[in-house]
Each structure stands twice: as structure tokens, then as C-alpha cells.
């Protein structure tokens, strides 16, 4: 464990190169519950010296999604010990040391109703619990990562959450240059440094359950999946889903095909980024045209492209969400949400931040699993009456087997 960092003087923010849309360097405060969200400004240009403005959390729909999806105790267990909640003395210490939690997004923005927004919730939850401000910086392209992290360092951030595998290189460099700052690296555990904690989830486990359920539900014998980018945190979802379909075929004698991804060759279809909704729509249409009636887009907001393709389809198609219970996160598509491959992002990120504020930061990675409640298959919701009445019992048995290790999931991307 390392002691909390010494107070850092707040310096003038470093200007980040201008881009089309940005919320770079906005100083944030936690909004009272029920405050109307202040969505990302998609048309504002960035001034060299950002003006501090409040960033309000979205109405607590995503938090509710996480709470419902992750039913029961969500103990933050890890490969070592779980970070403890900050005590009252820790809160006092945080204020006294000018503790400032910050976050930089991956592509897709903080209003993606998924990955980045869940990360921001974790930071704002922690800031509210600690009685401090937070700063969030939004990335539009990969070239924003390093300067965005640098801007947070310059503003005196004491703990910085970097959202996504693609930020690993920039995080590693920043951590080496700033050993007194704690970094929480989401979706990557490859950085070996005293001041970097990897926070990852074995989503293949929940994906396996959803794949089995999709294979049991399909009437066409074809299900599909694709990703935003071919990186381990994305293909991990896809591997789990495909392996679950394979398990159903083996157990039930079915021959359900997976379109869009081959877990053996690690070849499949990707949009190339996490923000091009139109590309996701076109890719989804191509998959649906092959007879797929359950589809899993993996990559934050790209699910919207799949949803649009389903709306325009002449046949019924079910949509699977990722990261959180999307039935609760985006009610516009409640009639087509089959289930979701969920993970406990707000809770885990918030607890790691609060532990850092209490002087209990550790560089030992956190891995969310079915066993510790870090990942979960969300309820069927409106599809409850459409699936076989015996399916839930089968899923319960499979989950027990995965936890016990008697049902292995083959994937090169496992954390």
C-alpha cells in the first residue's frame, strides 16, 4: 500500500490541441440527486484555458441499471485483497490533502450511455462521497489521450482514471513521469508500476451465459456479434458469447451459427472505432441480412447503429447490450433488449478512488468475475415470457459450473 500523495499545487491547465468537440479540462462538481443531466456539448470549440463549469451526472438511470443488474453483494474482490471503502477519517484526510479525482474518456464521450458514462459515474460517486470536486476530460481521437492526461496532471489531479485499453500507452508514460499521482487504468492490466492499478472484468463469463441463452432463443439458428475495435476488452465479450453458443450446441444437439466472429481464428467484423454510429448500422444490416435474429454489438454507443438497423428490419431481432443493463440505461429500445452482459464499473471505480483517498491505494489488479459479482447477465425483462421456462435454471447451473471451474471458457483475452 502507498501513502496518499502529497498536496500538489494547482497549475494553469495545459492547452490541448483544438478539435471539433471537447469538454477538455472542465472542473466538475457533483450534482444533487435528480438534477437534469448536462450532456456533452457536441458542437463547442475548445478555448486554450477552459472555464470551470459544473458537470452534472445523468439522472441516475445508469446507476439503477448497475444496481439491478448486479443483484446482491457486489464485493470488490480482486486477485489480492479488495479495496476498502474510505472511512470518515479518510474523507477528512482527502479534503486536507486537496484530493482531486479526475477522469479522461476513451472515444465515444461521456454521454455514450455505456462505457465512458459508467466510468464517469464511478468518479462522481466517489467525489460526492469524499466531498470533493472532480475534473473530467473527453477524448475524441486517439491523439487526444496523452495531452488530455497531461492537462489533468497540470490541474493538480491526485488520482486519474483512464478509460480504456487504448489509453494504456499514454497512461504508462504519464505514470512514469508522475510517480506521485495514482492512476486507475480501466480495461487494461499490463502496466507494472507502483502507482497504476489495473481494473478489468472477465466479461467472457457473463457473455457465455448470454450466448447460451441466445442460442436457446433463436428461431433462425443464427446469432451475430461485432465490435468497435479488435482489442482484448472487446473480443473478450465476443469470445464468451460465441463459446456460450458452442456450449448450447454441444449440450442440446443444436447447430446455431455465430455470424461476425470466429473465436478459434480470432477473425471477425469491427467498425474500427467506438463512435461511428452509421458504420455500426451498416455493419449490423449486413449481419442481419444473413438471417441473424439476435445481435451483440460490443463497443459503447455503437449499439445505437444496431438498434437503428433492427428498427428498419422486416423481421424481429433481439439486441444484447454490454457494460450495463441497457434495458434500464436506454429505454428507447426496451422492446428489443434481450439481455445485457453487465459489469460493476461505477462501484469498482468509486471504491478504488475512495481507497486511494484514505491512503489505501494498491497496484494489485481488480478482476471482476461472476463469483465476486463483478460481471453478470442482466434479466430478460420484456423477453422473460419469450424464452423457454427451463432456461433460467439451466443458466444457473452453467454459472455455478463456470465459478467452480468445471465449465472452462477458451479465450486468449482473459484477464
Image: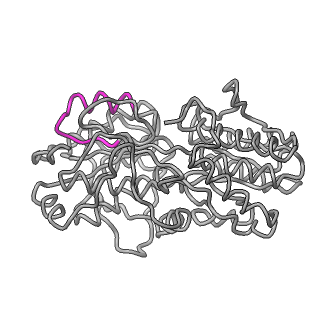
Residue at 77% across / 56% down in the picture?
Answer: 318
Horizontally, is 396 left or right of 3 in the view?
right
Residue 314, picture quadrant: bottom right
Examine the structure image and report whether residue 56 is included in the region drawn in magenta: no
Residue at the far top in the pictured view: 265
Q: Is residue 266 visible?
A: yes
Indicate the position of residue 138 as horizontal and vertical percent values.
40, 45
Q: Which residue shows up at 84% across the image and 42% down it? A: 256
Q: Position of residue 163 (x, y in %)?
A: 42, 43
Residue range corresponding to the magenta coloring:
168-184
Classify the position of the N terminus by image quarter.
top left
Is residue 299 visible to us here?
A: no
Residue 175 on image: x %, y %: 26, 33
Relative to residue 237, is residue 363 drawn left or right? left
| Position of 55 relative to 235 (above/below) | below
Report the front residue among 7 and 153: 7
Direction from residue 377 to residue 366 in the image, left or right: left
Amino acid at each position: 500500500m502507498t501513502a496518499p500523495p502529497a498536496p500538489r499545487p494547482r497549475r494553469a491547465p495545459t492547452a490541448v490541441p483544438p478539435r471539433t468537440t471537447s469538454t477538455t479540462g472542465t472542473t466538475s462538481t457533483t450534482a444533487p440527486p435528480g438534477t437534469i443531466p448536462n450532456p456533452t456539448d457536441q458542437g463547442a470549440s475548445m478555448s486554450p484555458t477552459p472555464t470551470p463549469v459544473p458537470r452534472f451526472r445523468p439522472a441516475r438511470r445508469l446507476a439503477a441499471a448497475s444496481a439491478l443488474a448486479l443483484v446482491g453483494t457486489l464485493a470488490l474482490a480482486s486477485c489480492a485483497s479488495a479495496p476498502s471503502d474510505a472511512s470518515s477519517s479518510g474523507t477528512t484526510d482527502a479534503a486536507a490533502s486537496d484530493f482531486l479525482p479526475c477522469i479522461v474518456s476513451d472515444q465515444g464521450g461521456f454521454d455514450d450511455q455505456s462505457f465512458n458514462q459508467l466510468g464517469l459515474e464511478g468518479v462522481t460517486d466517489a467525489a460526492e462521497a469524499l466531498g470533493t470536486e472532480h475534473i473530467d476530460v473527453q477524448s475524441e481521437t486517439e491523439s487526444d489521450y496523452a495531452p488530455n492526461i497531461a492537462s489533468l496532471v497540470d490541474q493538480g489531479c491526485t488520482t486519474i482514471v483512464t478509460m480504456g485499453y487504448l489509453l494504456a500507452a499514454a497512461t504508462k508514460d504519464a505514470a512514469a513521469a508522475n510517480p506521485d499521482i495514482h492512476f486507475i487504468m480501466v480495461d487494461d492490466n499490463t502496466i507494472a508500476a507502483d502507482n497504476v492499478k489495473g481494473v478489468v472484468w472477465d466479461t467472457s463469463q457473463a457473455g457465455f451465459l448470454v450466448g447460451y441463452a441466445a442460442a436457446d432463443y433463436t428461431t433462425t439458428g443464427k446469432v451475430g456479434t461485432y465490435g468497435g475495435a479488435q482489442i482484448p476488452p472487446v473480443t473478450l465479450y465476443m469470445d464468451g458469447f460465441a463459446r456460450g453458443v458452442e456450449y448450447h450446441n454441444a449440450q442440446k444437439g443444436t447447430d446455431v451459427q455465430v455470424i461476425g466472429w470466429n473465436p478459434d481464428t480470432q477473425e471477425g467484423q469491427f467498425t474500427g472505432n467506438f463512435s461511428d454510429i452509421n458504420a455500426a448500422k451498416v455493419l449490423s444490416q449486413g449481419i442481419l441480412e444473413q438471417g441473424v435474429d439476435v445481435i451483440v454489438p460490443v463497443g459503447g454507443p455503437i449499439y445505437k447503429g444496431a438498434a437503428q438497423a433492427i428498427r428498419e428490419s422486416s423481421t424481429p431481432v433481439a439486441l444484447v447490450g454490454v457494460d450495463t443493463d441497457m434495458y434500464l440505461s436506454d429505454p428507447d429500445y426496451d422492446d428489443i433488449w434481450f439481455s445485457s452482459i453487465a459489469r460493476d464499473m461505477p462501484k469498482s471505480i468509486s471504491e478504488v478512488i475512495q481507497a486511494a483517498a484514505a491512503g489505501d491505494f494498491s497496484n494489485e489488479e481488480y478482476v471482476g468475475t461472476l463469483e465476486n459479482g463483478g460481471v453478470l447477465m442482466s434479466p430478460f425483462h420484456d423477453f422473460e415470457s419469450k424464452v423457454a421456462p427451463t432456461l433460467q435454471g439451466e443458466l444457473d447451473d452453467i454459472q455455478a459450473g463456470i465459478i467452480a471451474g468445471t465449465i472452462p471458457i477458451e479465450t486468449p483475452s482473459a484477464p
